Amino acid sequence: MIHHVSVGTNDLPRSIAFYDAVLPGLGLRRILDDPGEGMHYGSGHIEFSTIRTDAPATVGHGVHVA
């Protein structure tokens, strides 16, 4: 079972603005701010994160299984 998904970004403010607009439609809201490093969304526990990275951001940044 997938626990949560993380995506990398090289532009954190832009990424947060995008996911703030998209994720509420899926029932997810901001639940944890990691200033300058990332934003975490969920519906009670972390289900999705956007994380700042200095490396090239890719679609395979992280899928966590529990």
Image (cartoon, rainbow, N blue to C red):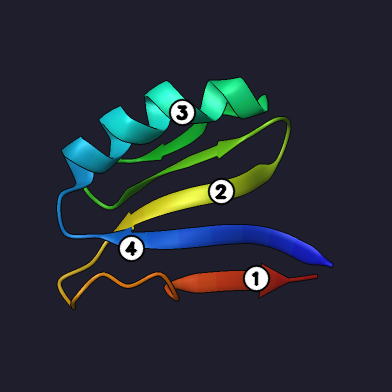
| Neighbourhood count class around disc 3 (C-alpha, 10 Å): few under 14, some 14–19, many 20 upward | few
Image quarter hosting the C terminus: bottom right
Across and down, in percent, residue 65 comes to 74, 73
Mark 2 vs 3: CB contact within 8 A: no
Q: Nearer the viewer, mark 3 or mark 1?
A: 3
Spatial distance from mark 2 to mark 1, Cα to Cα?
10 Å
Residue nearer the viewer, 59 or 55: 59
Q: Earlier in the sequence, mark 2 or mark 1?
A: 2
Q: Nearer the viewer, mark 2 or mark 3?
A: 3
User: Which of the numbered marks, if any, corresponds to residue 8?
Assistant: 4
Q: Quadrant of residue 54?
A: bottom left
| Neighbourhood count class around disc 1 (C-alpha, 10 Å): few under 14, some 14–19, many 20 upward | few
Which residue in the protein does label 2 denote?
48
Across and down, in percent, residue 24 comes to 56, 21
Spatial distance from mark 2 to mark 3, Cα to Cα?
12 Å
Spatial distance from mark 3 to mark 4, Cα to Cα?
17 Å
Which residue in the protein does label 1 denote?
64
The count of marks equals 4
What residue type is disc 1 on? Answer: His
45 with respect to 37 (left or right): right
Mark 3 vs 4: CB contact within 8 A: no
34 with respect to 24 (left or right): left
Identify the residue at horizontal 73%, vertical 32% (top origin): 44
Q: Is residue 9 above or below residue 19?
A: below
